């Protein structure tokens, strides 16, 4: 189109460059309409890549568990000694883990409340100390417990002189479980206390309720989901404790051999069939605990929907 050409009859000539402006506007409009399509194509490609990467990881996590269940289902009749080992290890694991849970809740609840509500000298140091067993290698935890409570340990030496021996006893199993599992409860309980609306506590105090009553009737019920989830996670961690227990309490059948240690012992002895059954029982218990945590952590409207 020649810009110098005369306009059609009856139409006033436009300003100089008007035709070029119309062409530029059309090109811009076409480019603008093409951008969303390009973004959609890029988004679709990105979605496929993200989905593929996620599927690979999910498959990697699910495959060993599925293989464990499949192989355990193929096992035949177990020997009587295997059932004896299973019964002893299961009873010991449940007994020691529940005892550890009671100690963790009794001692961890006040600590979690202080960390969530009070500012005191050394609070960050205490907070870091609570988190340390989570990242500490289990072998290091076991050696540390042995150096503290062993017969030649810092505290264990005094106890040995008094005739009290802790290592390689069921009580040592409980101590190892408390050491590695307590941070899980304290973390969750601290978050539960931090989420409590202080206005409700102040309202109860204004009505004349003493601090102990406010804590029992207002703070604890509101923080209960966090406390329950933390207790469940701590119990699950105590159930599967291995490294610190085998170094500090040993692997004595019927005395200190928990489920995790029994799996290790049966596999080391070449009894894969018994190790599979023991592992399947522990897997079922862990799955049940995890589902319980999910239910406790979900809101009522999430569960009803």
Image: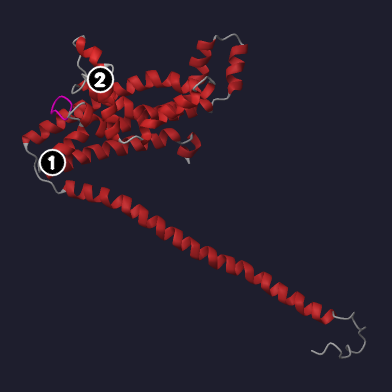
Quadrant location, the N terminus: bottom right
Quarter-wise, where is residue 57 in the image?
Answer: bottom left
Is residue 49 located in the magenta-colored stretch of the structure? no
Give the class, few, some or many, for how many residues have Cα within 10 Å of label 1's Cα (few <14, many ≥20). Answer: few
Q: Which one is earlier in the sequence, the residue at label 2 or at label 1?
A: 2
Which percent across, then down, holds residue 194?
53, 27
Residue 275: x and y, percent? 16, 41
Residue 107's image quarter?
Answer: top left
Query: Measuring 48% from the left and 41% from the top, which residue is drawn there?
Result: 305
Residue 27 higher or lower than 98, as above or below: below
- Residue 230 against residue 217 in the figure, above or below: below
Vertically, is 40 above or below 271?
below
| Chain part drawn in magenta | 251-256
Residue at image coords 59%, 20%: 200
Q: Residue at the location (33% across, 54% down)?
A: 59
User: What residue did someone put label 1 on?
Assistant: 268
């Amino acid at each position: 189109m020649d810009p110098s050409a005369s306009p059609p009859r009856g139409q006033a000539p436009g300003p100089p460059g008007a035709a070029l402006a119309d062409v530029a506007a059309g090109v811009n409009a076409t480019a603008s309409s093409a951008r969303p399509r390009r973004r959609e194509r890029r988004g679709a490609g990105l979605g496929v890549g993200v989905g593929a990467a996620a599927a690979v990881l999910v498959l990697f996590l699910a495959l060993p568990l599925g293989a464990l269940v499949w192989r355990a289902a193929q096992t035949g009749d177990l020997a009587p000694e295997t059932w004896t080992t299973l019964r002893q290890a299961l009873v010991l694991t449940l007994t020691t883990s529940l005892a550890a849970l009671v100690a963790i809740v009794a001692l961890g609840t006040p600590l979690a409340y202080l960390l969530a509500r009070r500012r005191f000298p050394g609070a960050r140091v205490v907070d870091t100390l609570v988190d340390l067993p989570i990242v500490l290698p289990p072998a290091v935890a076991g050696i540390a417990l042995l150096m503290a409570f062993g017969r030649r340990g810092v505290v264990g030496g005094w106890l040995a002189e008094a005739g009290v021996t802790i290592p390689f006893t069921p009580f040592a199993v409980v101590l190892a479980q408390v050491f590695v599992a307590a941070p899980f409860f304290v973390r969750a309980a601290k978050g539960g206390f931090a989420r409590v609306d202080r206005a409700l506590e102040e309202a109860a105090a204004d009505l004349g309720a003493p601090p102990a009553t406010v804590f029992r009737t207002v703070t604890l019920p509101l923080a209960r989901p966090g406390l329950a989830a933390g207790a469940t996670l701590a119990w699950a961690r105590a159930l599967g404790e291995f490294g610190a227990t085998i170094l500090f309490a040993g692997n004595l059948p019927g005395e200190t051999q928990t489920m995790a240690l029994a799996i290790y012992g049966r596999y080391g002895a070449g009894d894969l069939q018994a190790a599979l059954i023991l592992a399947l029982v522990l897997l079922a218990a862990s799955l049940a605990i995890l589902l319980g945590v999910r239910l406790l952590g979900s809101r009522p409207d999430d569960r009803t929907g």
